[in-house]
Image (cartoon, rainbow, N blue to C red):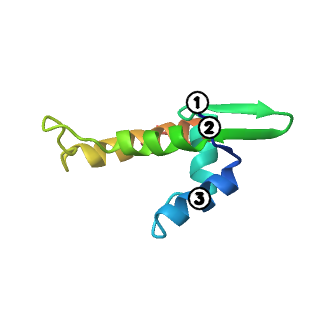
Amino acid sequence: MKIPRMRIAKVLVDELKILDPATPITICCIKRLVREDKLKYVKVGKKVLINLDFCIDYFNNQFDLDETTSPPSEKSTPEIKADRMEQYRRNIGLPINGK
């Protein structure tokens, strides 16, 4: 019987740094993935326990790109930024494009 290696976010990041000292994965990154339900976790009281093996599998599978995947074109980037800026202006109550 294999016992799951459950860790809190800080300990999980510490263990990831042992496996890969140059990893850019931070506690905030792990907590965001938990909040977005992308990592499997269990709540025990106030603690959130994350399965270390599932976390490693998650990151391994996120970057398996197939040949059909292509990076976004440079033309779409300004449009996306403009849409996000319009949404931001709407959210804070500013006029959009001088309207």
Residue at which label 1 appears: 37
Q: Which numbered mark, 2 or 3, is in the foreground of this view?
A: 3
- Residues at circles 1 and 2 in contact by the CB criterion of under 8 Å: yes
In this view, 20 is above or below 52: below
Which residue is at the front of the view, 31 or 18?
18
Spatial distance from mark 2 to mark 3, Cα to Cα?
A: 17 Å
Label 2 packing within 10 angstroms: few (<14), some (14-19), many (20+):
some
Residue beneath disc 2: 34
The Cα atoms of the two marked residues, 1 and 3, are separated by: 21 Å
Secondary structure under tag 1 reads loop
Q: In the image, what residue occupies the spot 62% across and 52% down?
A: 12
Image depth: mark 1 or mark 3 in front: 3
Q: Nearer the viewer, residue 95 or 78?
A: 78
Q: State which quadrant residue 18 falls in.
A: bottom right
Residue with the most extreme bottom position? 21
**Position of residue 24 in the picture relative to residue 14 (left or right):** left
Q: Which residue is mark 3?
A: 15
Residue 47: % across, % down: 80, 41
Amino acid at dot 1:
Asp
Q: Is residue 99 above or below residue 59?
A: above
Q: Earlier in the sequence, mark 1 or mark 3?
A: 3
- In the picture as drawn, the residue positioned furthest to the left comes out as 67
What secondary structure is found at the residue carrying circle 3?
helix
Q: Where does residue 34 sit, x and y in percent of width and height?
A: 62, 37
